[in-house]
Amino acid sequence: MSVSAFSLTRFPGGISGLLQVAFLLILLLLLFKAAQLYLHRQWLLKAVQQFPHPPFHWLFGHKREDKWEKLISQDSPLEVFQHVSLMTLDSIMKCAFSYQGNIQLDRKSYSYVQAIGDLNRLVFTRVRNVLHQNNTIYRLSSNGRLSDQACQIAHKHTDQVIQQRKAQLKDEGELEKAKGKRRLDFLDILLFANMENGNSFSDKDLRAEVDTFMFEGHDTTASGISWILYALAAHPKHQQRCREEVQSLLGNGASITWDQLDQMPYTTMCIKEALRLYPPVPNVSRELTKPVTFPDGRSLPKGIVVSLSIYGLHHNPKVWPSPEVFDPSRFAPDSTRHSHSFLPFSGGPRNCIGKQFAMNELKVAVALTLLRFELLPDPTRIPFPVSRLVLRSKNGIHLYLRKLQ
C-alpha cells in the first residue's frame, strides 16, 4: 500500500523513507526561498518604477553651490568625492526615504559616508586574504573588528531612517497624505506592501533592502559623478560644448523639467563615455547556473562563482578601439556596438534596478555644475583609479572649481 510522504500519521519505513522526507522538506524550503526572493525583487522593481518624483522634488540634494563657493574661495583644489557623496546621499534620502533634513549640513551623516568608505576598502582586502574567508578568524582580526564597527554605524543610520518613517506613518494625517501621493517613495512602497502582505517583511528584511538601496543609490552614483566631473575637467573642449548645450536649454538654471533631461544629447554622450572609462562598479560576481563552454573549448562547471571585470571590458581594445581616448562620439545616436559592450549598470535580469534614477541624477548634477563652475584638473594630483566595491581614486579626485559670472 502506498503512503504519501506528506501523511501526518505515518512515515515511510526505513532510512530511505526518512531521506525522502528530508529531501522533500529541503526542496520545499528552497522553493519557498526562491518565491520569497522573486516577490522581493518584484516589490523593488515596483518601487523603482514609481519614483523619483519630477526633478523639482529632488534637486534639493544638488543645491550645494553656496557650500562649494565657500570651499573654493581660497583658490585651492577641492577633493570632490566626499562632498559629492554627501550630495548623493542627500538626494537618495529625499527621493526614496521621505527625509526632510539636510544631510550635507548634518555632521552625523559624515560618519555614515566614512563607514561606507571603510566597508568598501575592508571587503576588498578580505577577498584577497585566504584566512579571512573564515568568519570566525575574520571577526578576531583587526580588520574584522573595524568591519563590525562600520556595519553597526551603517545599520544604525538605516534603522533610524526606517523607524522615523514608521513613526510618521502612525499619524493618520501623514498616512493619508502618503497614500494620496501620485508617486510613493521607495520606503513607503516597502512599508505599505509589508502592511498589505501581513508584515511578511521582518525588520531585518526591511533593513537589508534599505541598506542595499541606500548604498547603491548614493555611493555608486557619487563615484560616477566624481569621475565624470574629472573627465570633463581633463577635456575642456568637451566640457565647454556640454556647458553651451545646457545653457541653451536651461538659461540661468533656475529650474529644470523632467522632459529637459532627455534634451541634452551631447552631455549624455559625454556622461556615457566617462562611465565607460570609469565604470562606478568595476567588477561584478555571478554564480553559474549552468556550465559554460568558451569558443576555444575551455569550460566552467555549474555552481562556481565567476568575477566579471566591467573595467576590463570597457578598456578592451578588441571591443573599444583606442580605449584610453575620451571620445563621446562612440555614443552618438547613429553609432553601433555590441549590446553587452557597455555595462556601467551590469546587464541581464540582475542588472541595476535603479539605473534610470542614477542616469537622471548624473545628468542633473553635471548640468547644474557646468552652469555655475568651470572645472579644471589639478596637474599635481592626477587621480589613480583603484578597484573596490565602487571605483575610487587612490589619491582622491582633486579639481579646481572656478565660479562662472
Image (tube, rainbow, N blue to C red):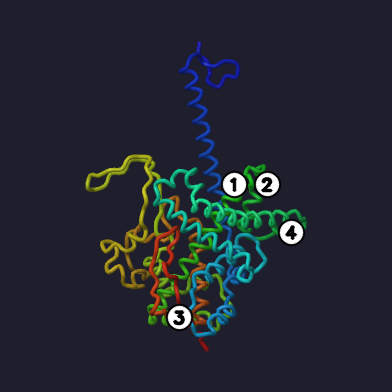
**Earlier along the polypeptide chain: callout 4 or callout 1?**
4
**Earlier along the polypeptide chain: callout 3 or callout 2?**
2
Gap between marks 1 and 2 measured at Cα: 14 Å
- Tell me the number on the disc at residue 174: 4
Residue 326 visible, this orientation: yes
Residue type, numbered disc 1: Asp
Gap between marks 3 and 2 measured at Cα: 48 Å
Asked where in the image residue 317 lies, by quadrant, the reply is bottom left
Could you say whether the residue bearing mark 1 is in a helix, strand or loop?
helix
Residue type, numbered disc 4: Glu
Find disc 1 in the rendering and name its residue.
205
Q: Nearer the viewer, mark 4 or mark 3?
A: 3
**Earlier along the polypeptide chain: callout 3 or callout 1?**
1
Residue type, numbered disc 3: Leu
Contact, mark 4 vs mark 1 (Cβ under 8 Å): no
**Earlier along the polypeptide chain: callout 4 or callout 2?**
4
- Taking the spot 42% from the left edge, 70% from the top edge, the residue there is 395
Gap between marks 3 and 1 measured at Cα: 42 Å
Find disc 2 in the rendering and name its residue.
195
Find disc 3 in the rendering and name its residue.
375
Could you say whether the residue bearing mark 4 is in a helix, strand or loop?
helix
Residue 248 visible, this orientation: no
